[in-house]
Amino acid sequence: MDALGGGGGIAGRAAWAMQRALHAEMAGGQEVAAPGEGGFADTLKQMLGEVSELQSVSEDAISAFVRGEPVELHQVMAAVEEAGIALELLIEIRNRLTEAYRTVIQMQN
């Protein structure tokens, strides 16, 4: 349940990836990668995979609860909220990237 917490979660990696992209833009387009890590696109793909996994866990928890398996309601609700927040974060990152792209395109005109 560390999807949105600390530097190791989705939010931490998203912030780090956006900072790295900004530094790359300032460095003339050269990719600035941390040791042992892929590029910006790899980070986004990993984040998409994690959000997808959270959605699957949420669906599994709901299904188990509906089938009457011994699953606590608060665990189901926590899984659903975590998946929802991760999806909202991913959508906001997409919106920010789109806005940044449009700004760069406008600056070129």
Image (spheres, rainbow, N blue to C red):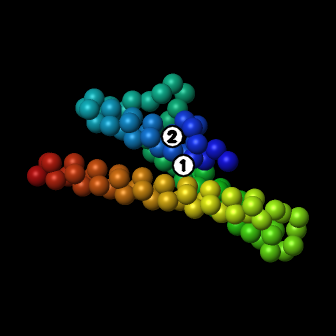
Where does the image place residue 22, in percent across and percent down from the top left?
Answer: 32, 37
Where does the image place residue 95, in percent across and percent down from the top left?
Answer: 37, 57
Left or right of residue 75: residue 20: left
Residue 103 vs residue 69, the one in the foreground: 69
Label 2, residues with CA under 10 Å away: few <14, some 14-19, many ≥20: some
Q: Residue at x 81, y 62 (%)?
A: 72
Q: Residue furthest top?
A: 35
The disc at residue 13 is: 2
Residue 63 vs residue 52, the one in the foreground: 63
Where does the image place residue 60, in percent across and percent down from the top left?
Answer: 75, 65
Residue 105 vs residue 96, the one in the foreground: 96
Label 2 sits on what residue type?
A: Arg
| Residue at which label 1 appears | 47
* One can see residue 42 in this view: no
Determine contact: label 2, label 1, CB under 8 Å: yes
Label 1 sits on what residue type?
A: Met
The mark that comes first in sequence, 2 or 1, is: 2
Q: Residue at x 39, y 34 (%)?
A: 20
* One can see residue 7 in this view: yes
The disc at residue 106 is: none
| Badge nearest the viewer, 2 or 1 | 2
Query: Which corner quadrant of the image does residue 63 belong to?
Result: bottom right
Q: Residue at x 28, y 36 (%)?
A: 25
- Is 33 drawn above or below residue 73 in the view shown? above
Q: State the separation of the CA atoms marked 2 and 1.
A: 8 Å
Which secondary structure lies at badge 2?
A: helix
